[in-house]
Image: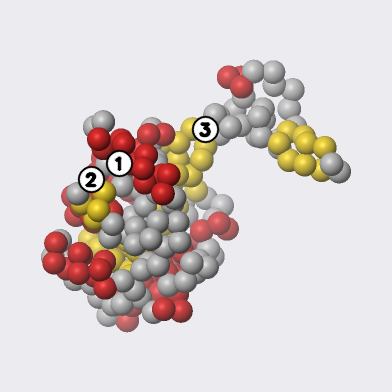
Amino acid sequence: MRFLCIIPARRDSKGIPGKNWKPLNGKPLIGYSIETALACEFIDTICVSTNSKDCIEIAQNQYQLTVPFTRPEEISLDTTPSHDVLIHAIEYYENQNESFDAIVLLQPTSPYREVKFLSECIQTFIENSNCDMVVSVNETHFNPYYNLYNETDGFIHRSIPSNYTRRQDCPPTYVVNGSIYVISIDSIKKQPLHSFEKVKKYIIPEKYGLDLDTLEDWAKAELIFANK
């Protein structure tokens, strides 16, 4: 199987200005995802999809990557779905007569993923060739059978009705942490990620799933590095 790794990095960011090239522990944030992709034996091609000159320069000058295109502004908005960005990259390579079986999506905002996690996630996809996607998750203490509630008619009720009196007895639930996605190209051509029905999980420890979206997240990340 052939795997295309896409690292999406918009120029503009509201939560953390310039975050994709902002230095984290002395390294541009996007560098963590690039280095992980370069170290993974399953990745055939790395595509940095960006409209940022800074990200292009980092990819080309620091990591000797070829950045095949500058992402069009119309699909570089904060409202642009990931699906549109991925399809744009797929179509670019198909027009260059290059075909792949799956996309590996690495978002720069997840700097703590390890190469081992990425390789095992891809292996899970290979072993389950009928699935739409394998995605990294971590088990969450917030459980719809116990302590997650919806409001109806002015009252709150458990999201999933149950008689559980201890969280430990509830079925485990998971949160998609955004660190790793391995996606069937055939599937994503037919429907967006949120519509997939055949999704396999790959569990990683919660501490590796930090997603940097706010200045508070960034401060926490700096603290983690400072304390090794």
The residue depicted at 36 percent of the width and 42 percent of the height is 219
The residue depicted at 73 percent of the width and 27 percent of the height is 162
Q: Amino acid at mark 2?
A: Asn
**Residue contact between numbered discs 2 and 1, judged by CB atoms under 8 Å:** yes
Element on which disc 3 rests: loop
Spatial distance from mark 3 to mark 2, Cα to Cα?
28 Å
Which label's residue is closer to the chain start, 2 or 1? 2
Q: Which residue is mark 2?
A: 25
**10 Å crowding of disc 1: few (<14), some (14-19), many (20+):** some
The residue depicted at 70 percent of the width and 21 percent of the height is 164
Q: Amino acid at mark 1?
A: Glu
Element on which disc 2 rests: loop
Q: Is residue 14 visible?
A: yes
**Which of 148/202 is in front?**
148
In the displayed structure, would residue 212 be above or below residue 51?
A: above
**Which of 187/103 is in front?**
103
Q: Quadrant of the C terminus?
A: top left
The residue depicted at 38 percent of the width and 60 percent of the height is 17
Q: Which residue is mark 3?
A: 140
Which label's residue is closer to the chain start, 3 or 2? 2
Q: Which residue is mark 1?
A: 222
Left or right of residue 10, residue 84 in this image: right
**Which of 14/189 is in front?**
14
**10 Å crowding of disc 2: few (<14), some (14-19), many (20+):** few
In the displayed structure, would residue 104 be above or below residue 227?
A: below
Q: Nearer the viewer, mark 3 or mark 2?
A: 2
Spatial distance from mark 1 to mark 3, Cα to Cα?
24 Å
Residue 26: x %, y % from top left: 19, 49
Q: Nearer the viewer, mark 1 or mark 3?
A: 1
Q: Is residue 40 visible?
A: no
